Image (cartoon, rainbow, N blue to C red):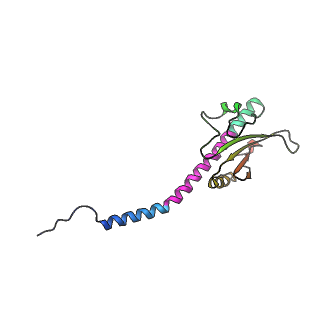
Amino acid sequence: MTRRRRAGFSYVELLVVLTIMGILVRIALPRLSYIRKQAQSRAVIADVRVVRDAVINYQQDRGAFPGETAAGQVPGGLVNYLPNGFTFLREMYTVDYELWPPAGGTTTPVVAVSIDTNDPDLVTEVRKLGATGLPHIISGTRTTFLLQGLNNIS
């Protein structure tokens, strides 16, 4: 008499596979979170560069810089120089365009873009990326990127 073998997996085999999958997920989740923060910080830096390019174009067209507005609000004259739908209010952070009076005997005002977020991991990642070419000032959860000398910033 021959025995027929049942098709399928035994409970032990299923438990082993599920255990291995659980271990892999536990290993991957922290890495996924880190990658997500890196992507968000790159989006922040990209936004700073978009605003910088818009300010450069505005200044070249009009011979002056746009006026300052409240945090999260796009300066009125700058709207035409930004991509369609570009907003200063983001899910994880707020963009603030700032125009400081001339300092140190210069006649050119200091143009800055500040990023404010309550996410400490995003703050850390933004500052790491900003340190690779964008001069910035750190104050709590706020990172202010200086756009004075606009042509020198990559």
Q: Nearer the viewer, residue 16 or 149?
A: 16
State whether residue 21 is above or below residue 123: below
Q: Position of residue 31 (x, y in %)?
A: 53, 59
Q: Is residue 109 magenta?
A: no
The quarter holding residue 121 reads bottom right
Q: Using the rendered view, name the quadrant where residue 124 is placed.
A: bottom right
Magenta stretch?
28-51
The number of numbered discs placed on residues in the rendered structure image is 0
Residue 133 seen in the current view:
no
Q: Position of residue 63 (x, y in %)?
A: 78, 31
Q: Considering only vertical position in the picture, is 142 above or below 51?
A: below
Above or below, 66 against 151 in this view is above
Residue 110 seen by the camera: yes
**Residue in the foreground of this view, choosing between 58 and 117:** 117
Residue 117 image point, x, y percent: 65, 49
**Foreground residue, 13 or 118?**
118
Q: Residue at x 85, y 38 (%)?
A: 107
* Front residue of 59 and 41: 41
Residue for point 49% across, 63% down: 27
Residue at the left extreme, as displayed: 1
Residue that lies at the very extreme toward the bottom in this rendered image: 1
The prevailing secondary structure element of the residues shown in magenta is helix
Q: Quadrant where the N terminus lies?
A: bottom left
In the displayed structure, does residue 147 sit left or right of residue 117? Answer: right
